[in-house]
Image (cartoon, grey):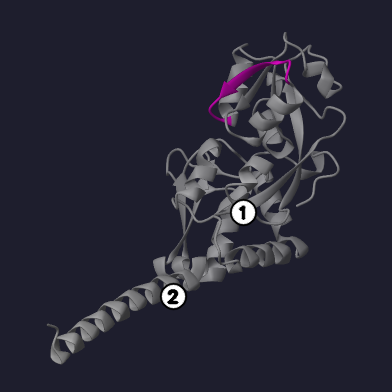
């Protein structure tokens, strides 16, 4: 037989359990409501990835181990706006989306917003309106993209990048030569393992400036523009992406993004005036 006192005890215990459960739910919701910006500020750091051999976006000092480049200037400026310290993690283009998904990094600069990627992460507004170009071996005539879409033409590109996606979509009949980095693609051309390299123009211009004898820098027709954006993890809190877009709008309208890009290009011995028209920073 249940006594009134026992029944009261059961009610009391149930109340404690319910309160504990509700407090746990409330804490989880509070943490979620805090969002990405609060998490970054609490950690005191804004983490991004950098890819070796991807000038002018990223440049690694082999001797000192430090990083420079347009995207490094960007993350430093954004971290300062958030009141935190920038943290740069070495990675590859092919793993950058996964790094965002798994929480290894908070943000990734210089990413192309492909539909497949957009199903996995979120993208900012346009940061750079790039264009695809070719570094072709001496003697190889390239006027249009169709000139490269042949089985006998070996096209080098770095795996997992926008170059990779573009070559497989636009040049389905070529012989693909997939390598790890943009620098490796140039090495494949130098070694005779490839007939040409496909890269966006700002990277190709740097690679060509290092060794003009490697081949001819060509802008095949029709010009294929490549939008470059900033990637962030998917989140129910829209404020971080809103912040990124506002930061981008301000720095583009003030010409600061262009300053960062021109500075990085000049550091790689590329005259910005030599770039083809139509690029937007």
Q: Write down the residue under mark 2.
A: 30
In the rendering, at what x and y percent does residue 239 appear? 60, 69
From which residue to which does the magenta span run?
172-181
The stretch drawn in magenta includes residue 252: no
Element assignment for label 1: strand
Among the two numbered marks 1 and 2 on one chain, the one whose residue lies closer to the N terminus: 2
Q: How busy is the neighbourhood of tag 2: few (under 14 within 10 Å), some, or many (20 plus)?
A: few
Asked whether, in this view, residue 79 is left or right of residue 276, the answer is left
Q: How busy is the neighbourhood of tag 1: few (under 14 within 10 Å), some, or many (20 plus)?
A: some
Between label 1 and label 2, give the one nearer the viewer. Answer: 2
Say which mark, if any, is on residue 122: 1
The stretch drawn in magenta includes residue 175: yes
**Residue found at x 85% / y 44%:** 278
Residue 76 seen from this side: yes
**Residue found at x 55% / y 30%:** 181
Say which mark, if any, is on residue 25: none
Asked whether, in this view, residue 36 is left or right of residue 177, the answer is left
In the rendering, at what x and y percent does residue 125 appear? 71, 56
């Amino acid at each position: 037989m249940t006594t009134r006192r026992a029944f009261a005890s059961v009610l009391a215990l149930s109340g404690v359990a319910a309160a504990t459960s509700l407090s746990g739910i409330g804490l989880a919701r509070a943490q979620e409501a805090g969002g990405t910006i609060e998490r970054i500020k609490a950690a005191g750091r804004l983490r991004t990835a950098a890819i070796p051999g991807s000038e002018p976006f990223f440049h690694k000092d082999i001797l000192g181990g430090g990083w420079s480049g347009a995207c490094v200037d960007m993350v430093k400026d954004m971290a300062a706006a958030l009141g935190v310290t920038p943290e740069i993690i070495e990675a590859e283009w092919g793993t950058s989306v996964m790094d965002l998904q798994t929480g290894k990094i908070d943000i990734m600069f210089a990413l192309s917003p492909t539909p497949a990627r957009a199903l996995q992460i979120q993208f900012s507004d346009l940061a750079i309106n790039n264009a695809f170009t070719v570094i072709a071996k001496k003697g190889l005539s390239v006027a249009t993209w169709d000139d490269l879409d042949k089985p006998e033409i070996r096209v080098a590109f770095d795996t997992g990048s926008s170059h990779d996606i573009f070559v497989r979509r636009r040049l389905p009949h070529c012989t693909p030569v997939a390598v790890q980095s943009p620098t490796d693609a140039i090495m494949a051309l130098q070694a005779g393992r490839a007939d040409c390299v496909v890269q966006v123009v700002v990277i190709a211009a740097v690679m060509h400036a290092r060794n003009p004898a490697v081949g001819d820098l060509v802008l095949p027709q029709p010009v294929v523009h490549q939008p470059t954006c900033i990637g962030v993890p998917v989140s129910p809190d829209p404020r971080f992406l809103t912040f990124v877009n506002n930061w981008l709008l301000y720095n583009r309208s003030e010409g600061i993004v262009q300053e960062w890009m021109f500075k990085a290009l000049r550091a790689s011995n590329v005259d910005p005036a030599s770039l083809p028209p139509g690029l937007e920073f």
